Image (tube, grey):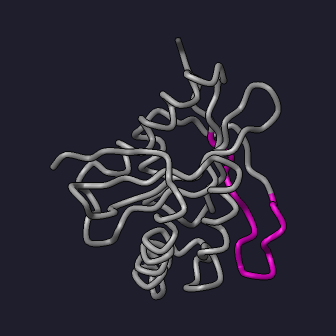
Amino acid sequence: MNITIEKAVSQDLDAAAALYGAVCDYLADKPFNPGWRRDIFPSREDAEQYLAADGLYIARDGGAVVGSIALTPEGDHILRIQEAAVHPDRLRQGIGTALLDFAAKEAAARGRPALRLYVWEGNAPAVRAYERNGFVRIGKEDIGLGEFGLDWFYLYEKRITA
């Protein structure tokens, strides 16, 4: 396995949308589904917005798209992970860790001393993955998705050292 992660270009949008669709299909009947629904969220339009904001990155193994991550700046000190996705056929192969390591390097390169993300409290696999990768829970918030059964989200942070 030779994972490379690079900034997405417009030609990657179809692959990003297909990745999101595959992840949504995988999560559809899982109790830890954080509200991801095919063609609703995340969608190609979300990928387009992250691409336009210069924050969409694609993970490849050879030519195959196996994951993605969206990063957006928040204030002067934070780089926020908006969406991290790993193809369901490639789970537990280190791709998620590679994406999180990449995000930490990107934060350091941008002079941002912290990465942050929200994760739905019921998404135990994601909570474990973030904690395993050095993220620390710093809060619990209602981010306005209660109508979808997603009342509380944990706010996680990883401090970045130069």
63 lies above or below 2: below
Query: Residue 27's x, y, as percent?
Result: 45, 79
Query: Does the stretch in magenta take in 152?
Result: yes
Residue at point 47% right, 80% down? 21
Q: Position of residue 46 (x, y in %)?
A: 66, 68
Q: Who is closer to the viewer here, 48 or 25? A: 48
At 48% from the left and 86% from the top, the residue drawn is: 28
- Residue at x 40% of width, y 81% of height: 26
Q: Quadrant of residue 37?
A: bottom right
The reply, left or right, for residue 18 in relation to residue 123 is left
Vertical side of 76 occupied by 62: above or below: below
Q: Which residue sits furthest left? A: 1
Specify whether residue 66 is painted magenta.
no
On the image, the x and y values in percent for residue 49 come to 70, 62
Where residue 4 sits: x, y (%)? 31, 44
User: Does 99 sit left or right of 90 as displayed?
Assistant: right
* Closer-to-camera residue (75/156): 75
Image point 50% across, 75% down: which residue?
17
From the viewer's perspective, tell me whether residue 56 is left or right of residue 89: right
Give, as a single range, the part of the protein colored magenta.
142-156
Count numbered badges in the picture: 0
